[in-house]
Image (tube, grey):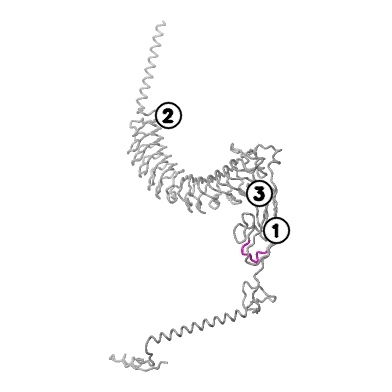
Amino acid sequence: MFDGIAVHQRLCLGALYLLAAGVALTSETRWPCPQPCRCNTELLEVNCSHGQLSTVPNDLAKEAKLLNVTHNIIKTLVHQQFQTLTQLLEMDLSDNLLAVVEVGTFLGLQSLLTLRLARNQLKIIPVGAFAGLPNLQLLDISSNEILLFLDFTFRDLAALQCIKAADNDLVFISHQAFTGLTSLQELHLDGGNLTAVPTEALSQLSVLRSLHFHQLGLTALPNYSFRHLVHLKELVISHCPWLETLSGNSLFGLNLTSFTIRHCNLSAVPYIPLHHLVYLVYLDLSFNPITYIHGNLLGDLLRLQELHLVGGSLLRIGIGAFRGLTHFKLLNVSRNLLTTLEAGAFQSVDTLKTLGLNNNPLACDCRLLWVVRRRLYLDFGGHSPTCATSVQLQGWNFLDLSEVEQPGLLTCRQPRIINRKPQEVKVDQGHTVVFYCISDGDPLPFVNWLDPQLRPLSPIGRIRALSNGSLEVRYAQPQDSGTYLCVASNAAGNDSLPVSLHVRAFPSSSKNPFHLKGWFAFPSASPGVNGNQKLPFDVKTLVMAATIGFLSFFGSVSVCFIFIFFWSKSKGQIKHTATIAYVPRSAMSSSNRGTGNYMETSRFTMKLI
């Protein structure tokens, strides 16, 4: 009995073994896997990477959906190279030695969604190379040596949504290069050798939403560079070491929500090009030598939530720099040269959620007290700011100070003007005057000068506030007279000092003047008691001018007569008579009525005087 059961079990196991072997054989038959490729029937993947292949294998499984042929030595793709792989969804040919892609190479790949040809040696892509890819959505041709895009290079890729073409050697993009890309939403380009932004080519991309420009070789971004990209929402310009300015209308026509311009050479925030971007949410100006964010110049960016300016040269963020930005949530100004960040720079510090302030030479005083008090509500990105210029707190993480320690350590000293001695200056018109205003305080006070009408004076002009805190009045005029005010201020308060200037007009130098009433009104003349204009004349000066004028006229006339006399002598003997012949009018009338041509002439002689 037990022997029968054992035999039955052996028969069942044998049947199962044969069945398994048959399945395996069928699988191998359906899935040819050429050496040195590895095939995965579950993922429907053929992996031929790192196989030292010089050509793509021909006997690949028709059912494959993923093909990886990276890190080989393939140099050429020929016509209809992949025509049997009708089910393929993704193909990666990156990191080869590809230099030639023939026309019609990808015919038959109707289902392909992703094609990667990055890090090869392509210099030109012939028109028609991408024929047969009606459903392709991603094309990666970055890190090649492509020199130009010809007209209609991508015309067969109507479903394409993203092109990655950065890190190439593009010198020219034809105006019709992007024709046919009716679905393209994201484009990465390298413009290191381009002499201009390919505005006309970009105008073909009617639905483009994201544009990344790398290595632009321009010093200034021209006006209307992206004028036709009405649906563009994200613009990234990066690694452009020569780009110094953005022209006032360079972003005209755009309605961006995100704008990045990193690793460039901007020395100032491009306020004018940005001001119309009222829907901008994200702004990144990192790694530019920007030194100052001025007050009240970003208020047009009503919806701005994030500003990144990492690795710049920021020395100061002015009071009111972010005034009007009611949605402002994130500021990252780490790795700069800031000594402080005052609460007055913000519309409200209550809306701020993230603050990057590390790696700045911060002076820990009362100006940063607001940061300490809001430390529980702020995210510092895991990098707490530390004191650098404060002797007492140098190297400290001032966020760790207790509420008892804060008032005694984070302090400021109110400004004090040292030279309190009155300055009253009286000078003649045309002289240059300098007023001095020396102050101290902690932090170092900022000095402003106000004119007699209490208007701030700028660092430029004839009357200017110097960087050392002094006031200079060059070529003083009577209308400059008045009281000027020096105001020294810091976070703890301010101090002021008035100075006085009186400018005397030029005195009259005439000894015996006489006045003409009611003749001419000169702008420089001052009205008399009766309202008439009085013009002083110097008699000696008047006589001398008349004498000089007469002598000059007499001399000129004499020279002319002498010249005429000698010129006439050089012409020989002078005739004293002249004979003139003429035809009387009556004789001419008679001749017209007759048939002859004879006309009688008359003569008379004149005596020349």
What's the amino acid at mark 1? Pro
Q: Is residue 31 above or below residue 358?
A: above
Of label 2 and label 3, which has the lower sequence position? 2
Name the mark nearer the viewer: 2 or 1.
Answer: 1
Residue 249 at x, y percent in the picture = 51, 53
Q: Which residue is mark 3?
A: 444
Specify the quadrant of the image occupied by residue 432: bottom right
Q: Nearer the viewer, residue 383 or 64?
A: 383
Residue type of the residue flagged with mark 3:
Leu
The residue that label 1 is drawn on is 498
Q: Which residues are magenta?
A: 473-482
Question: Would you say the residues marked 2 and 1 are in contact, meaning their CB atoms lie under 8 Å apart?
Answer: no
* Picture disc at residue 43: 2
- Percent x, y for residue 476? 63, 64
Q: Which mark is residue 144?
A: none
Question: Image quarter for residue 107?
Answer: top left
Kindly give the residue lying farthest to the top in the view shown: 1
Q: Amino acid at mark 2?
A: Leu
Instruction: Decide: is 486 above or below 369.
Output: below
What's the residue at 35%, 34% (across, down)? 56
Name the N-terminal-most of marks 3 and 1. Answer: 3
Q: Residue furthest left?
A: 596
- Residue at point 70% right, 55% down? 419
Answer with the quarter of the image where residue 184 lies: top left
